[in-house]
Image (tube, rainbow, N blue to C red):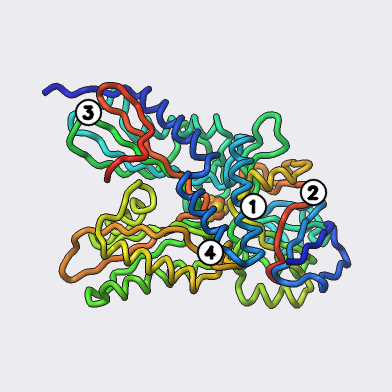
Amino acid sequence: MKQHRLLVPSKGTDFSHLQPGDKVLLSGVIHTARDQAHQRLVELISRNESLPFDLANTALFYCGPSPTPPGKVCGAIGPTTSSRMDPYTVPLLEQGLKIMIGKGERSADVETAIKKYGALYLVCCGGTSALLAQTVISFDLFAWPELGAEAIYRLEVKDLPCYVAIR
Amino acid sequence: MAKKTIQANEIRELVLDAIGEIFCTAHPETRQLLENALAREKDEIARDMLETILGNHEIAQRESLPLCQDTGLLVVFAELGNGVLIEGGSLRDIIGSAAAEAWDKYYLRDSIAWDPLRRGTNQKGTTLPLILHLEQIPGDELILHFALKGGGSENCSFLKMMLPGAGMRGVEEFVIQSVVESGGRPCPPVMVGVGIGGNFEECAILAKKALMLPSEQKDEELREMEERILDEINKRGKGVMGFAGSTTALKVCILAKPCHIASLPVAVNIDCHAHRVTSRRINVSRETSDDSGATR
Ligand code: SF4
């Protein structure tokens, strides 16, 4: 098993050295987005409105964190099932999204689009959220607080352990 | 004979205690099964993931952080003795308000869509919606079985009204395919609950019970069937997180009940390796115990 370090933002980055099954320790600024946030992002795109962040400059983590207990950086964080985001993913890739982190398989359409746009789909080990939380350096509510766990949170991570699934 | 009473507050304390245990503590049997799987597993990536899962158990416990950010829906099977009277509210209200308290106390994630169709609002209630199955049993006890059930694994649930002629082999194939085709979505390695018989809704409840209630398979043929299904899932499955290795399932549990001569209902309910279940018991002598040995 090969291991790589990867920094986000990864604008202009070439992922061709990464092979499916390789382990990746991801560091940098990433944003969470689940079903509701995806729906809103795609609505903004379809209305030609600007997004709350530059997709090319971050990674989307399919994750709805648990609340932060006092004295901790964040609560439990970990991947949710990626296939629920499949219907929204191609428009985001068209807008420059390069890295997605989740769990489970993707649809054939999404897989093709990931390859076409030179993007990267990483799988994170589900149900290991207390351990993953230890890689979070900072954690902030970023957009759409009314969505609760489905809001967008901005995370700075150091060595978040993932595996290359599709590139 | 006068009924013996159990006060709402006793139940409340027990709910807080049970949820406080399972949100951050690995289930002992599941942990053992994961360790066994790691000892057998040859694939390097799968081993790395299993080690991560086991490492998470320790960190969750030490940090009092949830094993998984999806702290689930609360599912409760309640067995209420016919000699017992509950004072201070209905069982649903008592458990629901204690659960809401537990959610705040342990910083669990609010994962409730209050309206299943019109989503996108974050409502908060003083009681938590829960899935409650209440059954009356003879005697002077209240037994509660709890699960924090994640959405990802629950989405991988299957029910089929099979032809009676499908028999054991047909049922086995249906169960195997259900788990294998779920791929990485329910966070394998998984626990598999299978309900056979009853009717449409009862076989689903049996499948959930098979996952949640502690038991030993007493029917020799069903025990062999569980083993065959488990072996075959691990042969055909895609491994840890649907990604690598030969560990897709940890355990298969079957519960069977009589059914109509025209029917063979079969249900499959999957739980992830973050298998958060426990049981508690109150008897009239006011002793509360950790009830891992409860009978069905
Ligand atoms: S399936 Fe289980 S381990 Fe995976 S995200 Fe859901 S609750 Fe967590």
The image quadrant of residue B162 is: bottom left
Mark 2 lies on a secondary structure that is: strand
Q: Nearer the viewer, mark 3 or mark 1?
A: 1
The spot of residue A129 in percent (x, y) is 63, 47
| Circle 2: residue type | Lys
Say whether mark 2 and mark 1 are on the same chain: no
Q: Which residue is mark 2?
A: A158
Give the spatial CA distance, label 1 vs label 2. 16 Å
The spot of residue B289 in percent (x, y) is 36, 30
The answer to whether the residue bearing label 4 lies less than 8 angstroms from the nearest atom of ligand 1 is no
Residue at far right of view: A12
Give the spatial CA distance, label 3 vs label 1. 45 Å
What number is the disc on residue B52? 1
- The structure residue drawn at horizontal position 81% and vertical position 53%, both measured from the top left corner, is A27
What number is the disc on residue B247? 4
- The structure residue drawn at horizontal position 67% and vertical position 54%, both measured from the top left corner, is A33
Q: Which residue is mark 3?
A: B84
What number is the disc on residue B7? none
Give the spatial CA distance, label 3 vs label 4. 44 Å
Q: Nearer the viewer, mark 3 or mark 2?
A: 2
The spot of residue A31 in percent (x, y) is 74, 52
Q: In the rendered image, which quarter contains the N terminus of chain B?
A: top left
- The structure residue drawn at horizontal position 78% and vertical position 56%, both measured from the top left corner, is A26
